[in-house]
Image: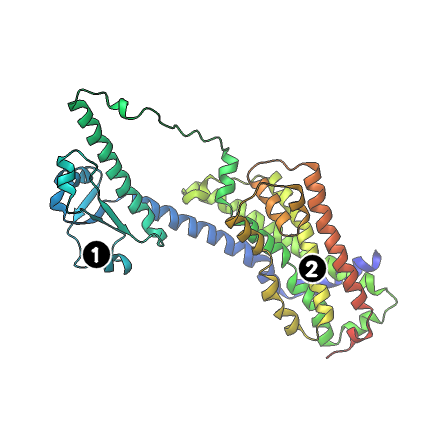
């Protein structure tokens, strides 16, 4: 253990002497993530408020066929406008978000007290058009209900007769669960940060020292190669956990600022220090897996560039469970906590939603992660015993 501590201390001191690398490794994430949260949250909130509160200019094709409907739309802060020469092209080229079309048989259906059809032309693939389309659709539905109630009253009927059953939604989700929905992107960022948090250091202390020919004298000392490798891994893990702690602290500060500035949905988020402690415990196995896997890769390649070429592939691993759960959400099951990346994803979401993890889930999540890290450690230790490791390519 003394050898492990000495090697870890030596690697951390070398890293802290390189101030530029230290600042990039420790402060890049904590500075970029708050900008992302405040910037994206603020822009989303500002755009939503603008689309909901401002007067919506709505092109109407053949508006003369439905004057009463247009008058009602004006009362809902929707201003009918003349249509463009080619409505379909205007929608495809994003000149307008939504266009209201009054069919030729609208007046006939209206006079016969039959359902009169109107069309809302829009492009469903455009997210920015959702709010305008919903505003117009809800206004038309409100107009339809109002006219329907008046028709029933003229016939001496109670409008309630036309609605024998109605559903009243009752939202049983907790504030913590709604907070978890807002932070659905957070597990990927945290897992990626933990998985590759010590990437630079762990590649440099093996493949980098091999290129600089400083690894051979270290391996020639009486200390065991397992202890030397473990010291390097311990240094990378310590650096990765420190970086992760700073990132989580920046998240907490960002959510506090967002709440103070009313910067979008993130203003409702408040991650407690207890939750941050749980997240650090959940992500520690991921830090260990990342550092031991990169040590294994660095010990098997011939140069730093070759080791770094694996980074693009490794960066895809944390996003796999996020995409799978986004497409096919499933209820937590115990076996999920034995699958790397998926286990951390589910555990992080439970913490953010304020839902407790059982002792079995904690045990499986931490045990499987530490076991995989130990397996990578054993494989890397075998490579450290190769004589070719000390020879620069």
Q: Is residue 298 left or right of residue 176?
A: right
Mark 2 is surrounded, within 10 Å at the Cα level, by few (under 14), some (14 to 19) or many (20 or more) other residues, namely many
Residue 29 placement (x, y as % from top left): 55, 56
Residue 12 placement (x, y as % from top left): 71, 61
The mark that comes first in sequence, 1 or 2, is 1
- Say if 310 sits above or below 38 in the image: below
Q: Is residue 130 left or right of residue 143?
A: right
Q: Which residue was labeled with disc 1?
A: 87
| Secondary structure category for the residue under label 1 | helix
Residue 263 placement (x, y as % from top left): 41, 45
- Say if 270 sits above or below 368 in the image: above
Q: Residue at x 24, y 57 (%)?
A: 88
Front one among 234 and 158: 158
Q: Which residue was labeled with disc 2?
A: 291
Q: Residue furthest right?
A: 222
Residue 290 placement (x, y as % from top left): 67, 58
């Amino acid at each position: 253990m003394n050898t492990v501590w000495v090697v870890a201390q030596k690697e951390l001191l070398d890293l802290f002497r390189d101030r530029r690398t230290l600042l990039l490794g420790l402060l890049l994430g904590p500075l970029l993530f708050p900008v992302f949260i405040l910037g994206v949250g603020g822009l989303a909130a500002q755009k939503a408020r603008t689309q909901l509160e401002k007067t919506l200019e709505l092109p109407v094709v053949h508006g003369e066929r439905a004057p009463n409907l247009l008058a009602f739309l004006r009362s809902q802060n929707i201003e009918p406008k003349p249509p463009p020469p080619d409505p379909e092209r205007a929608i495809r080229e994003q000149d307008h978000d939504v266009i209201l079309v009054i069919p030729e048989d609208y007046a006939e259906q209206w006079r016969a007290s039959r359902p009169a059809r109107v069309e809302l032309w829009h492009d469903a693939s455009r997210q920015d058009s959702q709010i305008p389309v919903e505003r117009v659709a809800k206004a038309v539905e409100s107009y339809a209900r109002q006219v329907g109630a008046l028709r029933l009253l003229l016939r001496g009927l109670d409008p309630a007769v036309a609605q024998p059953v109605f559903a009243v939604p009752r939202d049983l989700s907790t504030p913590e669960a709604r907070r978890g929905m807002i932070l659905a992107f957070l597990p990927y960022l945290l897992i990626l940060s933990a998985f590759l948090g010590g990437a630079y250091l762990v590649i440099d202390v093996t493949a980098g020292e091999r290129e600089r020919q400083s690894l051979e004298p270290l391996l020639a000392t009486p200390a065991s190669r397992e202890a030397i490798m473990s010291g390097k891994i311990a240094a990378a893990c310590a650096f990765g956990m420190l970086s992760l702690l700073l990132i989580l602290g920046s998240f907490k500060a960002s959510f506090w600022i967002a709440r103070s500035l009313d910067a979008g949905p993130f203003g409702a988020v408040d991650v407690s220090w207890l939750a941050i402690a749980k997240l650090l415990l959940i992500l520690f196995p991921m830090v260990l897996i990342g550092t031991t896997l990169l040590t294994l890769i660095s010990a098997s390649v011939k140069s730093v560039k070759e080791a770094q070429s694996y980074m693009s592939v490794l960066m895809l691993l944390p996003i796999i469970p996020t995409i799978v759960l986004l497409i096919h959400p499933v209820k937590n099951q115990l076996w999920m906590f034995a699958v790397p990346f998926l286990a951390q994803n589910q555990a992080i979401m439970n913490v953010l939603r304020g839902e407790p993890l059982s002792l079995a889930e904690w045990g499986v999540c931490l045990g499987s992660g530490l076991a995989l890290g130990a397996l990578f450690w054993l494989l890397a230790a075998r490579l450290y015993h190769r004589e070719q490791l000390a020879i620069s390519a």
